[in-house]
Image (cartoon, grey):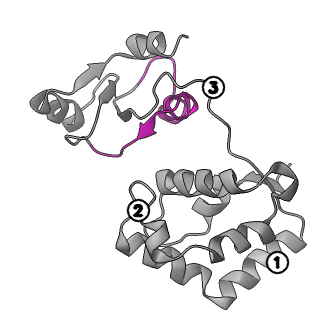
Amino acid sequence: KAKSTTLTRLIFALGIRHVGEETAIELAHVIESELDQNNFTITNFLLQMHRFSAEKLQEIEGFGEKLATEIINWFNDEKNIEYLKKLEKVGIQLTKTTQSLSNNLNGKSFVVTGTLKNLSRDQAKQKIREHGGKIQSSVSAKTDFVLCGENPGSKFEKAQKLGITVLTEEQFLQMIGV
C-alpha cells in the first residue's frame, strides 16, 4: 500500500522550493489531464514535466515566475531525475488525484480557520477540492468564503473587514449537500 501514492502527494513530497500543497494539487491536475490511467507512471510524469517551459507553467493559475523557475530548475537537475527513476524502479506507483464529486464550489476560493466540530481542517479542505473549490492560506480580496470554526483569530477579522462571506461548518456542509 505504501508504494502507491497520488501524483499530488509525490509532487508535494519532492520538496521543490515554493511548491506547497495547493501548488502541488494544481500542477498534478494539469499533468493528470494529459495522461490516462494506463500511462500514469513516473517516467511519463517526467516526460510531461520536460514539455513545460517556465512561460507555460506561468499560465497555470497562481504560478508566478519564481515558482515556475524553481520547478523547471528542479526537473532539469540530473540527480533529481535519477531519484525519481529510482522511486519507479523500487515499485512506486502513481494514482490520479481524486476527481471532483460535483462542481458546487467550482471556481470559489476558501480559507479555513478555527476549530471545526465535525471535520478536521484537512477533511474540510479535501471536501472543498472534491466539489471544485480552491484553498487559499490567507484571506484576501480574492477570497470568496471563509469557513470558520471556534477560535478563528485574525483570518475571521480580516474577512469581516473585507466583507467576505463567513460560513459556519453547518452552512458549508449544506452548501455541498451533506
Whether residue 112 sits left or right of residue 89 in the image: it is left
Across and down, in percent, residue 76 comes to 60, 86
Whether residue 7 sits left or right of residue 37 in the image: it is left
Helix, strand or loop at label 3? It is: loop
Give the Cα separation between the discs numbered 3 and 2: 25 Å
Helix, strand or loop at label 1? It is: helix
Give the Cα separation between the discs numbered 1 and 2: 28 Å
Kind of residue sitting beneath label 2: Phe
Q: Nearer the viewer, residue 3 or 116?
A: 3
Classify the position of the C terminus by image quarter: top right
For disc 1, the marked residue is 86
For disc 2, the marked residue is 63
Whether residue 113 sits left or right of residue 80 in the image: it is left
- Please name the residue shown 44% across and 39% down the image: 134
Kind of residue sitting beneath label 1: Lys
Give the Cα separation between the discs numbered 1 and 3: 34 Å
Residue stretch rendered in magenta on the structure: 116-138
For disc 3, the marked residue is 101
From this view, report whether residue 12 is shown above or below residue 164: below
Q: Quadrant of residue 50?
A: bottom right
User: Mark 1 or 3 closer to N-term?
Assistant: 1
Q: Residue furthest bottom?
A: 78
Across and down, in percent, residue 80 comes to 66, 82
Q: Quadrant of residue 160?
A: top left
Across and down, in percent, residue 166 comes to 26, 22
